[in-house]
């Protein structure tokens, strides 16, 4: 396994802190049933949130890691439900793979369509992404809006849209757990999710950074 460069902290002090944090997570997390690659994702999510519940709440489609690495190595777009995900992602890491994040939640046309059609901005943002042909083969990253996840699943079922990977981690009380339960039943494309109400953009960013780190050290997808 090669030594990561792009996905490492930029200073020795930063690297020591991060590596020490990961060691604490490994020590305190207890037993788990994840593969080595899946644990890299879960561990980084725990590191980002200090919440050990994600050891168990996080679930993976059998092909999720492989699909995510292939998408990264091909420079696939990332379509997010909110700007926070795009801002949180490391630009140097994305640029290394020729990747670009997109989000449309605050676009004026998205807001106007949501008002006209009595839907949410998140739904219309996903429809705008589809109109721009960004969803096919993309990584869809949803950390805030359950209606965005429900719309993506509708597109998968009705429009035969095929993202490379759906990261479904919306947080909240209305339709968050339900949308993720529906995602867990999706057989058309790979996914990773957090069961229940927990989630959020921070967790999505952590999962993506873990995948970017895995892509750097593995020349071939797992």
Image (cartoon, rainbow, N blue to C red):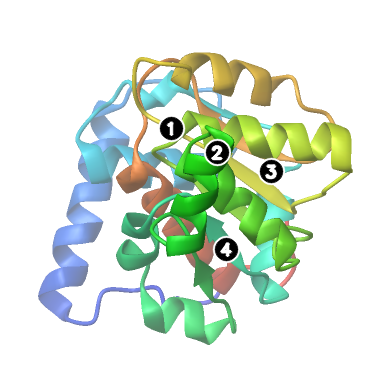
Q: How many numbered marks does the figure carry?
A: 4
Circle 4 residues within 10 Å: few <14, some 14–19, many ≥20: many
Q: Which of the two discs, 4 and 1, labels the residue nearer the N terminus?
A: 4
Q: CA distance from mark 3 to mark 1?
A: 18 Å
The image shows residue 27 at horizontal and vertical percentages of 26, 33
| Element at label 4 | strand
Q: CA distance from mark 4 to mark 3?
A: 15 Å
The image shows residue 165 at horizontal and vertical percentages of 68, 49
Name the residue at 68% across, 70% down: 76
Q: Residue 78: which disc? A: 4
| Element at label 3 | helix
Q: Label 1, on which residue?
A: 170
Q: Which of the two discs, 3 and 1, labels the residue nearer the N terminus?
A: 3
Q: Nearer the viewer, residue 121 or 188?
A: 121
Q: Nearer the viewer, residue 139 or 207?
A: 139
Q: Marks 3 and 1: which is nearer the front?
A: 1
Q: Which of the two discs, 3 and 2, labels the residue nearer the N terminus?
A: 3
Q: CA distance from mark 3 to mark 2?
A: 20 Å
Residue 190 relative to residue 57: left or right: right
Seen as rendered, the residue at the extreme left is: 13
Q: Marks 2 and 4: which is nearer the front?
A: 2
Split into 4 quadrants, where in the image is the C terminus? bottom right
Q: Label 2, on which residue?
A: 148
Q: Which of the two discs, 4 and 3, labels the residue nearer the N terminus?
A: 3
The image shows residue 205 at horizontal and vertical percentages of 39, 54
* Quarter of the figure with residue 69: bottom right
The answer to whether 207 is drawn above or below residue 29 in the figure is below
């Amino acid at each position: 396994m090669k030594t990561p460069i792009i996905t490492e902290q930029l200073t020795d002090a930063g690297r020591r802190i991060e590596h020490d944090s990961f060691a604490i997570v490994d020590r305190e997390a207890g037993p788990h049933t994840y593969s080595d690659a899946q644990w890299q994702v879960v561990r980084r999510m725990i590191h980002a949130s200090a919440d050990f519940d994600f050891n168990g709440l996080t679930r993976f489609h059998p092909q999720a890691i492989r699909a995510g690495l292939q998408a990264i190595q091909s420079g696939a777009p990332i379509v997010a439900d909110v700007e926070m995900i795009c801002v949180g992602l490391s630009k140097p890491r994305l640029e290394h793979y020729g990747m670009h994040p997109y989000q449309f939640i605050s676009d004026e046309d998205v807001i106007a369509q949501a008002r006209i059609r009595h839907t949410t901005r998140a739904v219309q943002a996903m429809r705008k992404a589809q109109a721009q042909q960004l969803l096919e083969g993309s990584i869809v990253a949803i950390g805030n809006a359950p209606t965005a996840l429900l719309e993506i699943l509708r597109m998968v079922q009705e429009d035969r849209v095929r993202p490379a990977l759906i990261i479904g981690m919306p947080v909240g009380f209305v339709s968050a757990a339900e949308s993720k339960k529906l995602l867990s039943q999706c057989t058309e494309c790979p996914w990773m999710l957090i069961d229940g109400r927990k989630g959020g953009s921070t967790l999505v960013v952590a999962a993506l950074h873990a995948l970017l780190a895995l892509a750097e050290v593995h020349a071939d997808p797992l």
